[in-house]
Image: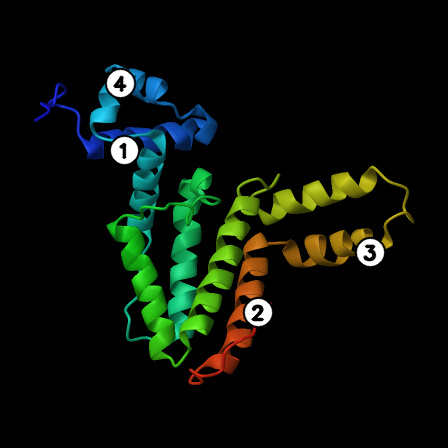
Amino acid sequence: MKKDIQPNLSREKIVNEAISLVNERGMPALSMRMLGARLSVEGMALYYHFPNKQALIEAMLDRVHAEISIPEADIAWQDFVRQRSASVIEVLRHHPWAATLMESGVRPGEYTMQDRERLLGVFRRAGFSVSNAVHAITIVDVFTYGFVAQLVNLSFSTKEDAAVVGQDVIAMFAPDKYPYMREMVSEHMLKRGYDVMDEFVFGLELIITGLERFEGESNNKIETH
């Protein structure tokens, strides 16, 4: 039997440090050598706890899933989706590297499985067929994760910043070259104030409205080709 040559090194400690590393420097910075240096051990010592880098990444993703607040199962599925999506956005804004990787693991951890199980359950209990429940989860997650991936790369973070950016962009071009863009900046970003989260709420409500046609119709399967 192997002996742990690093008694102070644990899976939890490694995962915590790996998440800190990629939160600070992005996923490209993650390597066993770099992580080992931050933990004051040789990179090879990490392989006692994780067989490869992919296994470590999946453990990191499971930890991110653990931070997502999963609503109570007895609420309406629409509210479940709204509350979970809001929590996903909040969590992924702190871990932007995870937005494009959330469902990429082939060996999901316990928290990832709990999230999947609760999502499937809330749609199945609402009368969605198995196929439609899968479709529903996929479209909600693709929209939510994709929105965060775009959100963290925006060049503005407040309504005021958005207006300044919009004005600066329009000022680069002749007044009649992009009339609809100019209208959007003047009528929407300057007068109303542009909050990108309004776009998320709008899009999520469209998805929920579209999915409501399958509530209670467990035999109504969307045909895909």
Q: CA distance from mark 2 to mark 1?
A: 41 Å
The amino acid beneath tag 2 is Thr
| Amino acid carrying mark 3 in the image | Tyr
C-alpha span from label 4 to label 1: 18 Å
Looking at the rendered structure, the number of numbered marks drawn on it comes to: 4
| Lower position in the chain sequence, tag 2 or tag 1 | 1
Circle 4/circle 3 CB separation < 8 Å: no
Q: How many residues crowd around disc 2 within 10 Å: few (fewer than 14), some, or many (20 or more)? A: few
**Residue at the spot of label 1:** 16
Q: Quadrant of residue 31?
A: top left
Q: Identify the residue under disc 4.
A: 44
Mark 4 vs 1: CB contact within 8 A: no
Which residue is more in the foreground, 159 or 1? Answer: 1
The foreground one among 138 and 173 is: 138
Q: Residue at x 75, y 43 (%)?
A: 167
Residue denoted by label 3:
180
Residue 187, position as x, y percentages in the image: 75, 58
N-terminal of the pair, mark 3 or mark 1, is 1
Q: Position of residue 154 (x, y in %)?
A: 60, 42
Between circles 4 and 3, the one closer to the viewer is 4
- Which quadrant does the N terminus fall into? top left
Q: Earlier in the sequence, mark 4 or mark 1?
A: 1
**Is 118 or 1 nearer to us in this picture?**
1
Which mark identifies residue 224? 2
